[in-house]
Image (cartoon, rainbow, N blue to C red):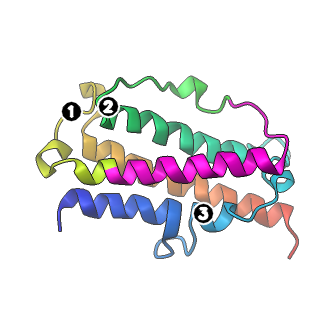
């Protein structure tokens, strides 16, 4: 198996369909979640919606680079999103999140193994491989927060 296929599959697991590492994934946690829970505040913590949008922000930005574009995302804007006011807005966001994730996976699989070790945009950002691996780790980090927030907000 190509390294790029393996790493793309690991990314797919955390967002869309895996249960091996965390016993869950973003789609499992978010797909049938009521928007009111997604935007509910717990003390001064980020909401579930903001955490999901944060991860999506980076996916979309990296996709642009994968397609030959520039890296336009900035950490200082990675939590700045318009509020979600309805179930329809939440579901529209989720559909975009899943579609952009599918695109990320597809584009990552197209990268050659040699390109994985090449500089991603600028040397300060490391290699393509490092950036994809960081997206996996970053996604798991916030997935854990989402799981905990759901437990605090939903009394099953």
Q: Quadrant of the C terminus?
A: bottom right
Q: Which mark is residue 131?
A: none
Identify the residue shown where x is 44% and y is 54%. Answer: 102
The residue carrying mark 2 is 125
The residue stretch that appears in magenta: 81-106
Q: Residue at x 38, y 63 (%)?
A: 10
Q: Is residue 47 visible?
A: no
Who comes first in sequence, dot 1 or dot 3?
A: 3
Answer with the quarter of the image where residue 5 lies. bottom left
Q: How far apart are the alpha carbons under marks 3 and 2?
A: 28 Å
Helix, strand or loop at mark 2: helix
Q: Residues within 10 Å of mark 2 (few under 14, many from 20)?
A: few
Res 92 visible = yes
- Image coordinates of residue 74 in percent, x first then y, are 50, 24
Mark-to-mark CA distance, 1 and 2: 7 Å
**Residue 123 position (above or below residue 13):** above
Which class describes the residues within 10 Å of circle 3: few (<14), some (14-19), or many (20+)? some
Magenta part mainly helix, strand or loop?
Answer: helix
Q: Secondary structure at mark 3?
A: helix
Give x and y (percent) for residue 136.
Answer: 43, 54
Is residue 104 located in the magenta-colored stretch of the structure? yes
Task: Identify the element where label 1 is drawn.
Answer: loop
Q: Residue under circle 1? A: 119
Query: Relative to 106, is 42 on the left or the right?
Result: right
């Amino acid at each position: 198996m190509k390294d790029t296929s393996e790493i793309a599959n690991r990314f797919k697991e955390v967002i869309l369909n895996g249960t091996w590492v965390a016993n869950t994934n973003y789609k499992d946690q978010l797909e049938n979640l009521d928007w009111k829970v997604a935007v509910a505040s717990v003390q001064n913590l980020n909401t579930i919606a903001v955490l999901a949008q944060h991860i999506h922000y980076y996916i979309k930005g990296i996709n642009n680079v994968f397609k030959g574009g520039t890296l336009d995302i900035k950490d200082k804007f990675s939590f700045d999103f318009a509020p979600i006011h309805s179930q329809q807005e939440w579901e529209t966001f989720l559909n975009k999140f899943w579609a952009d994730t599918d695109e990320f996976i597809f584009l990552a699989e197209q990268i050659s193994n040699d390109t994985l070790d090449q500089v991603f945009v600028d040397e300060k950002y490391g290699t393509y491989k490092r950036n994809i691996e960081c997206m996996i780790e970053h996604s798991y980090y916030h997935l854990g927060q989402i799981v905990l927030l759901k437990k605090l907000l939903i009394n099953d």
